[in-house]
Image (spheres, helix red, strand yellow):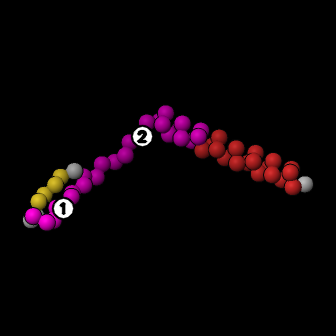
């Protein structure tokens, strides 16, 4: 991030865009997290349906 002072009141910020590179283990753990959360939601819906029956 670079700062350039234009005058006493205004400061402009310039962002340098860089591609996001993620580790494969991080992507895999994120996938497993959402998969397990989805499984819990399905189980919760099933339990609610059993209770309503």
Q: Residue at x 70, y 44 (%)?
A: 40
Earlier along the polypeptide chain: callout 1 or callout 2? 1
Q: Is residue 45 above or below residue 9?
A: above
Q: Regarding mark 2 in the picture, which secondary structure is present there? A: loop
Q: Percent from the top left, x then y, of residue 10? A: 15, 65
- Identify the residue under disc 1: 12
- Identify the residue under disc 2: 22
The residue positioned farthest toward the right in the image shown:
53
Q: Is residue 35 left or right of residue 26?
A: right
Alpha carbon distance from label 1 to label 2? 29 Å
Q: Is residue 37 left or right of residue 7?
A: right
In this rendered view, identify the residue nearer to me: 32 or 11.
11
The residue positioned farthest toward the front in the image shown:
9
The residue positioned farthest toward the left in the image shown:
7
Q: Residue at x 16, y 61 (%)?
A: 11
Q: Is residue 9 above or below residue 50?
A: below
Q: Is residue 20 above or below residue 26?
A: below
């Amino acid at each position: 991030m670079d700062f350039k002072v234009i005058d006493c009141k205004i400061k402009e910020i310039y962002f340098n865009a860089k591609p996001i590179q993620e580790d494969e283990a991080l992507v895999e753990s994120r996938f497993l997290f959402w998969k397990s959360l989805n499984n819990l939601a399905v189980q919760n819906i099933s339990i609610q349906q059993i209770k309503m029956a």
